[in-house]
Image: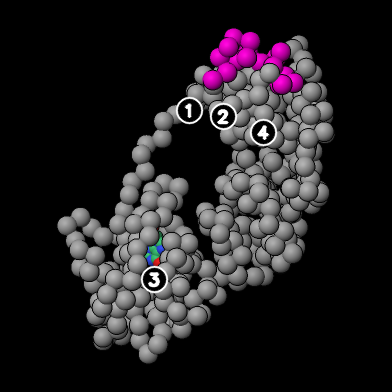
Amino acid sequence: MNSYLDIYRPLLLWYKNNQSRSLMPWRKTKDPYKIWVSEIMLQQTQIARAAPFYNRWIEKFPSIKSVARAPEDKILKMWAGLGYYRRATNFHKACAFLFKEHHAKFPTSIAAFRELPGVGDYISSAVFSIAFNEPIPVYDVNVNRVASRLFELNTTRLASKKKAISLLSKMVTESKNARDFNQAIMDFGRTVCTINSPKCHNCIISKKCQGFINSNIMKFPIIKKKPQKPHYRVVVAFIWKKGKILVNKRPPEKMLGGMWEFPGGKIKTNETPEEALHREIMEEFSILINIEKPVDRFTHTYSHFSIDIEGYKCKYVSGKISQESNMPYKWLHPHQLSSLPFPSASEKFFNKLI
Ligand code: DGT
């Protein structure tokens, strides 16, 4: 049988000498709840950016119970700045479920953990291997890069990706140290086996690396071309009535669900921003407004699209709000806006409204 000793042993040694617990506070714990929090944050956020959020989160919400008991607005507000808010609402739901059905205890099996909202392959393998040393490999972009170079695998093909995972699985099992191996290979991919300038001449496993031996390092990993992101024009209204501004909560099933926003929406082709605003406000609230003047505009990029968002100062004229979607709404003094979770794109308008 092929042994992977020459790969996992140097990686484990490298990890022992190179990991930085102070930059990654989650590495000081084996508490599965805390590791879960860190892995959710790290899925879309860089380490240096995630660390202060993690520390604040753990201070405010030290347990599953504390998350379950918090209102959604508090959860989203604490998440503000990290983006990808679905992660926070799913985490909230998952903790609420564990609190209600399992006395707020962390699941004892990976299968039960995977049933929870927002818990997929990556999160489940990461948390169970790091917290409990379960022999399961993790597979993120960094691991993909290392594995595809080591074995010259085109991991855009499912069969080759499965092969990479099975090879990693052998290493994890043989090493008997999934906890460190998984973190080692992720760190190694991020800092040594990097995308554009891999440090092959100082690499501790280059002798075992097919990509290096065959001078093919830069051919791997093979990446599927992403389709171009669509771009939308969005218009929002700051509807004033007696010194207050109208805001509403986004429906839970939509992107940025559960966050507060200024009324408005996408501008359709052939529509002016003003026409779009009148249409949106009528559709969503059945009220009449006067559009007074443009306030500001910004560009914002999300994972799958980007927007130009422009805001208009408006005045409430008449009509009783009858919201088609029954979503909550509020009239707020401008200085109250920052107490609620808003998408970053709309927060950019706050200082123009005070
Ligand atoms: P839809 O209507 O199915 O296309 O989906 P929505 O509701 O996600 O899109 P819409 O028409 O409300 O477009 C607004 C986009 O702008 C949406 O992706 C969220 C983003 N956005 C960020 N901040 C705000 C805000 O304060 N108000 C509104 N209306 N949208 C905001």
Give the residue drawn at x 61%, y 35%. Answer: 140
Residue 195 badge: 2
Stretch in magenta: 202-218
Q: Are marks 1 and 4 in contact (CB under 8 Å)?
A: no
**Quadrant of picture, ligand 1:** bottom left
Q: Is mark 2 within 8 Å of ligand 1?
A: no
Name the residue: 54% across, 20% down.
218
Residue 70 visible in the snapshot = yes
**In the displayed structure, would residue 344 be above or below residue 245?**
above
Residue labelled with disc 3: 262
Q: Earlier in the sequence, mark 1 or mark 4?
A: 4
Q: Position of residue 132 (x, y in %)?
A: 79, 42
Query: Which residue matches tag 4?
Result: 191
- Residue count near mark 3 (Cα–Cα under 10 Å), binned few <14, some 14–19, many ≥20: many
Q: CA distance from mark 1 to mark 4?
A: 19 Å
Specify few, some or many for label 4: CA neighbours under 10 Å numbering under 14, 14-19, or 20 or more: some
Taking 147 as reference, is 348 left or right? left
Whichever of callouts 2 and 1 sits on the residue coming sooner in the sequence is 2
Q: Residue at x 79, y 18 (%)?
A: 5
Q: Amino acid at mark 3?
A: Phe
Mark closest to the chain's N terminus, 3 or 1? 1
- The disc placed on residue 223 is 1
**147 or 66: nearer the eye?**
147
Camera-nearest residue between 268 and 202: 202
Q: Type of residue at label 4?
A: Thr
Inspect the image, locate mark 2, and give the three-letter code of the amino acid beneath it.
Ile
Q: Is residue 39 left or right of residue 353?
A: right
> Which badge, 2 or 3, comes first in the chain's sequence?
2
Tag 1 secondary structure? loop
- Which of label 2 and label 3 is nearer to you? 2
